[in-house]
Structure formats: C-alpha cells, structure tokens
Amino acid sequence: MDKTFTPQNFEQKWYDVWMDNNLFAPSGDKDAEPYSIVIPPPNVTGALHLGHALDGTLQDILVRWKRMQGFDTLWIPGTDHAGIATQIKVEEHLKKETGKTRHDLGREEFLKLVWQWKDDYHKRITSQFKKLGVSCDWSRERFTLDKGCSEAVNEVFIQLYEKGLIYRGNYIINWCPRCKTALSDIEVEHIDKQGELWHIKYPIVDSNEYLVVATTRPETMLGDTAVAVNPKDERYAHLIGKKILLPITNRQIPIIADDYVDLEFGSGAVKITPAHDPNDFEMGTRHSLENIVVIDEDGVMTEKALHFKGMDRFECRKNLIAELDNKGLLIEIEDHDHSVGHCERCETIVEPYLSDQWFVKMKPLAEPAIKKVKDGETQFVPERFTKIYLNWVENVRDWCISRQLWWGHRIPAWYCGCGEVTVSKKEPVKCHKCNGTQLKQDEDVLDTWFSSALWPFSTMGWPEQTEDLKRYFPTSTLVTGYDIIYFWVARMIFTSIEFMDETPFDDVYIHGLIRDAEGRKMSKSLGNGIDPIEVIEKQGTDTLRFALITGIAPGNDTRFSQEKLDSSGNFANKIWNAAKFVLMNLEDFDGKEIEHNQLSLADNWILSRLNTTKAEVTKELERYELGNSAQAIYDFLWNEFCDWYIELSKPRLYGEDANQKQVAMWVLNHVLEETMKLLHPFMPYISEEIYSNLPYSKGYLITSSWPKVDNRFVDKKIEASFESIMEVIRAIRNIKSEMNVANNKDAEAIFLANDTEGFKVVKEGELYIKPLAGLKDLEISLSGKKPQKAMSKVVNIGEFYMPLAGLINIEEEIKRLQEDVKKLESEVTRVQKKLQNPGFVNKAPKQVVEKEKEKMENYNQKLLKVKERIKELKS
C-alpha cells in the first residue's frame, strides 16, 4: 500500500477491474432472490450536480449491499431526453453561436443538432456516474428516446387512446409564452409574490348601481363573459339574472350565481373569463358562457382586446388601469400577496390559455393506484410521504400530455382534411373514413414525463415479454427526491398498474435536497454550488460519498459543507493508516483459526463489538437508515478499532510470546477484513484496495459475502466491562490534561470500587489501564481512605484519585491558570464591546455576528472551567 492515502492512485484502477470482469451484471443465479433498481434518469442538459451524486450514492450503497448478501442484482442506468429543458438549451446555444432560431434550420436539421447535443452530454453524464463508483450494469443502459422506449411510448399511447383514456380537447392549460408550449400542473412552480388587487366598478345595465369586482389580473377583463356571485350572498340576490356593462368594451354580460364564488374574497363578486382561468372555464362550461381569447401564445393581446391589440400582457395591464382610473372606474388598489405560477424551466410567468391539446383521463388510472398503495403493495420511506402521494392522487386532474416542441416522442396521430383523426403505430397510407391520402402528422410531441412514467418496465424491454421483465419486474426499490413524487413516482405507479397489473416497485426511498452549510438551496445565482467531479479529483470518490451520507435521514434535507468533506477525508486517512499498521504487522501471520480460549479480554471485547456493529449496520440498512449505518461503521472503526484495539494489540505484536502474537494478528486481520466488507457499499474503492492487500483474502470484495453475526463472539457483559475500563482510562487522561501533565508521564492512582463487580472489572483491566493511562502504580480496593491533595473523578463503577505530589507544583499551576483567567477575561471584554456596538451588529453579515456570539460563549465556558480548577487546587 502507498505510504499516504492517495485515492487517485487506485480508484480508476478498481473501476476498470470491476468493469473488465463484468461484476456489475446480474449473477445469473436463478436460485437467488432478484433485487432490481432503475436509476432516476438525469436530463441530458448538462453535468451532474451534487443532488445526482447523492441519489447515485444511495442507490449504489443498496445495490452493493444486496449483491454481497447474495441477491441477483440488476441496476439499470439511463438518461432522459428532457424535452423542454434540452430544447431550450440547444436553442440558446444555436442563437449564441449562429444567431439563428430552430425555425431557420427546420425541424429535421434542428433535431440533428439536438441529437449531437444529447450524445455529448450523455457521454459526460455516464463518465461522471462512473467516477462516482456506481455499479450499474452499463450493458443495459437506456435512453428515453431510444428505439425500445419509443416503441413502448407508442404502444401505451395507442392502448390508452383506444380505451378512451387519451383524448384531444379544447381546454384551459398552463402555457409558457417563452417556451411556446403547454405545461402540466406540476411543471408550474408557484412563487409567492407581493402584488396588487385592483377593485373595479362594473356598472349594471339600466341602473345606477354597480358591482365592485376585485382582480389580480385586470388585463383579462377584456375577455370577461359574466360576473358571478354566490347564490347565498344576500347582498347580490336581487341582481342575479341582470346584465353588467363591461368597462372599456361596452359589452353586456350576465350576472350569474355559482357556489364556487367565495363570499369572503374581495367584494364577493367575481369576474369570469373562461378562456384565461381554469376555474372560470369550468364555470363557463356549467353556464354555457362564451370563450373570448384576449391573450395569445406570445403573451400579447389579441384583436379581441380592442385598442390594446399587440401590447404585451403586462404593458396592457398598465395602460388598462390608467384608462379605468381616468374613467372613474378604479376604486382601490390593495396590496395583495399571492402565488404566481412560473415555468419551471425558464421562470417565465405562466399564462392560463385555452388551447387544443391531448389529455390523459387520470381518475380511472388513479383509483387502483390509490388502493394498491393503501394496501401496502408499494411503501414509502419515510411513511409520511404516503399521505403526500395520496393527497395528490385523490385530487388529480386530467394530465395535458402534448407539448409544442420538436424534441421528444412525436404524437402518433394523423389528421385528414375531412376532420378524421387516425392514431397508429405506423404512418397510415390513407384515411379510413374518406380514403384520402393527404394525411398530416400532429406537430406536437409528448410530455417528457409520459415516457419516463414507463421507465421501470420500458427499460426491461416491454412491450416484449423479455426475460429481464419476467425476472426483475417489479423492481425492488426506487430511490428519488421528494420533489418529483408527483412528476414521476405517481405516474410510474399509474402506468405500471395499467399495463403490468402491479406496482412498479416494492419500496420508494425518499431523500431530501442537499443544501449548503447555512441551509440554503444550492444555486448558480448564490454561487454556493459544489461540483462533485471537482471534489472527486481533489479528495477522492470515497471521501465525497461518505460526506454525502453523513447525518442523512430519509426524507429530510441535508446540509453539505467543506467541513463535512474534510471530516470524511480524515476518516479515510485514518482507515488507511490503520490498515497500513495492520498489514505491516502481518508478515509472520500463518492465517490459522484461533481457539476461543486463546483470546484476551481485549480480543473478546473487539470481536463482540465487531459483531454487534454488523447487526446494527445491517438493521439500519434494512430500515433505509443509511446515515445511521454509516455512523455505526465510523464509530466502530475510528473510536474502537483504531483508537483502542490497535493500541491494545501492540504489546503482544512487539512482545516475545509467539502464540500471543499470532492471536493478535488473527484478530487484527479478521476485524479489518470484516469491517472492509461493512464499509464497501459506502466507500467501495478504499475498502477494495485494503481488502486486496490482506494476506488471505479471496477474490474481489465487491462479490464477497456480506458479514454475518457470529454469536460465539457476542458478549454484552464483556462489552460493558471494557467500556468501564475505557471510561477509567479516559478519566485519568482528562485529569492529566486538566492539570497540564503529559499523558506519557507516569503517575499513581487509587481506585475505590463501588462493589465487587467493579473491583473485578478494574483488576482484569489493570494490564490495559496502566500503560494506556500512563500509570506506574494503581491501587485497587473496595474501601479505603481518600487521599489528601489529590484530583478525583467519579466513574460508573467507582471513584479514583490521583495524588498531585510529584505530578505538578500546585502553586506554579495556580499562577499559570490565573494568567489564563486574565487572557480570557480580556477576550470576553473585547467581544462584548463588539456585540454592544450597534454599528457592528446592524451592519455585519448575520453569520459574522453569530460567530462572535459563539466566541463569547466559548470564552465564558473556558473561563468558568479555569476558575473551577483554581478553586479545586486552592482547596
């Protein structure tokens, strides 16, 4: 092994070995239980970010663990064509490089350009995943626009169409004026904004009365076709059925009654614009109102908007308000915070728009999806996300699936001049109604999520009944973030039940988002993003992976920082150095099994702790508490094996007793080998490298067996006893530290046990306590006189004393501590003045102020401790 931990020297080497030996592929063992995962396909729009790294790491941990447990594992990788996102990126690139638009190129040439983009970024994404160490079966890699996935998409579209579950209709949809396409409800990001609520007079025909209507979108009033009031609203009961003279337009529109109107909102009278609001559209349908489109697909006012024609919608708003004010029809402008829909991709404010689109009827698909999740066929981890899923599914609306894009699965529908629509897998030769041959295919493509909804079974070859499909579907676990439960998880459940007659996965493991050290969402604008590849190149893959899962809990957001990375790197370095020490001391190891009666107390303790850790790690993995399982490995390796057992083994390794030396070597080798197996799913490279250097290891760690608990070595009593011994050693070391005495300086101690059990524990542990605590003499008794001028510590099994004579000069120590008091008091005063200065507190960044407050607290705590020590010494 290298002298220092240098991951760049072996990480790529091991990935190549795994790939060359086809170790990521399923085992092919038909007697083994299958375990399968499909990767959430990243968009081919750019490089992977830290969220992808987390998602990939979590999946890889599960897959490597299951592979070692003997499961026949399949992990299918792939990427998503990401219709809107990719087309926007390519269009922006085309405009920047050539000044041209896609329309200048034409559909065919533009799509060639997008496919080239896809190839470039697909390669980049694949190489980044490989850098992360993910053990996908790359021979089964898929793309949502590949031939097989495209066939599945067409098959699903046609079957749903023939069942009457896909239809084309003229309805209100979400429209992005920038992307020039329809969006589904979940592609709209609602952002709370401070806006206005305009109160406008609507005069009643043949009357001096008027209704006051409140609206957040006054420009749409030009398309009003009614004013609605609640039938229970006594204020307006006498006006129902009368006419309103719509301001500016002078059109007469009816006053209607509808239960939808909220009596408490605004004036209780609501303008109805069926062509520009989904709720108004439904009301308009109930009351047979006219649909008047006044805003077009560019967000520009139409000819129906009269003299506002050609204005941008927000320019129109400004001019319309001014005109209403001039006419005395604007009563009030009220500040109003409300949620405004934005395009998730380009952040443009979305316009509700009346348009001919393709839709999926969701209610018939939702009913079995609700039942199967309630019956537990698919379980969410953590369980609270079941309610979130059910809440959306139980209130689901029909899904608008057509997109006005060129990049994507083109809708398999052809139109004839006679008005007939033909839906078919292949281009029809003629119209089956009029026999006309002038057929034109629909220009639109399907929503990206339509194809990714089929991902769990389309990736396995459906609609063909492939061997993969028969063996690995349904998949075992889906790992994904909570932000796409609606986008993706729910839709996969719908389609799988409809076409495979079962849910697509047994468990859905939901993780949170990665935020920066201050809890902020990572973004380019904040400049707080971290490139996972840069981290890998600088600190190694294992360091990144372990930092990502440190402290993680299912469903919760996690904070990521350089401190976490450094801590993870220190852990890797600690493991490396411990392994080097062990390997250097195994030169004479004969590899023979050791009899239980040859083991020392320390041996039995570390072997019991090893097996307890095995049980804990496995239990936490089974519960999807990956952060807890990683922490258990960390605690065992760092705190118990490295910090304690290795030190405890040295006297025998360097001693004259050859038999005891072999025992110590056997334990060191065994514990290191077993912990590398436990560590492998989390830190695959360093564990494989160390394992390969062990003298009697066989094969590759990636395909070795998961460690099983050996109950012969589990002894909770020994664990408790040795914990007491370590507590004694720590306590003695703490006293020395407090007294500023070097740990290696010999001292004397007197131990008074609480009972015979405590006496026995310390007596058995004496051979460890004396060298590790730096004692030349340890007096152990059940009763005895407490010595004068001695520091004392109480532990769980008794109390011990360290006479100060010979250790320190009490008067000199008091003087030294009094100097420390002066320095600390000076620091407290300095920070106190800073925090009492309004200029600093009000102007400095919040994190700077908080840091000063932390300093103040630390200084005060240190000051208190030093004063307590002085008091102890004086007494």
Image (tube, rainbow, N blue to C red):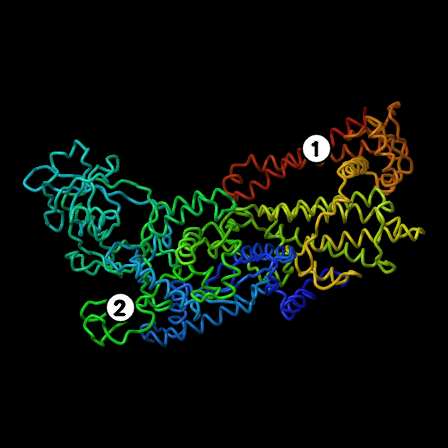
Q: Amino acid at mark 2?
A: Thr
Q: Name the foreground residue: 652 vs 346.
A: 652
Q: Is residue 111 above or below residue 821?
A: below
Mark 1 lies on residue: 863
- Label 2, secondary structure: give it: strand
Q: Quadrant of the N terminus?
A: bottom right
Residue lying at the far front in this picture: please name it: 31
Label 2 Cα crowd, 10 Å radius (few <14 / some 14-19 / many 20+): many
Label 1 Cα crowd, 10 Å radius (few <14 / some 14-19 / many 20+): many
Distance between mark 2 and mark 1 Cα atoms = 84 Å
Residue lying at the far right in this picture: please name it: 656
CB of mark 2 within 8 Å of CB of mark 1? no
Earlier in the chain: of badge 2 and badge 1, it is 2
Residue 422 badge: 2
The residue that appears at 9% across and 40% down in the rendered structure is: 242
Q: How many marks?
A: 2
Q: Name the foreground residue: 466 vs 288.
A: 466
Specify whether 831 is left or right of 455: right
Q: Is residue 738 visible?
A: no
Q: Name the foreground residue: 113 vs 670.
A: 670
Residue 739 percent coordinates (x, y): 81, 35
Residue lying at the far left in this picture: please name it: 206
The residue that appears at 81% across and 24% down in the rendered structure is: 875
State which quadrant residue 730 falls in. top right
Of discs 2 and 1, which sits in the foreground? 2
Specify whether 86 is left or right of 565: left
Q: Amino acid at mark 1?
A: Leu
Residue 679 percent coordinates (x, y): 68, 54
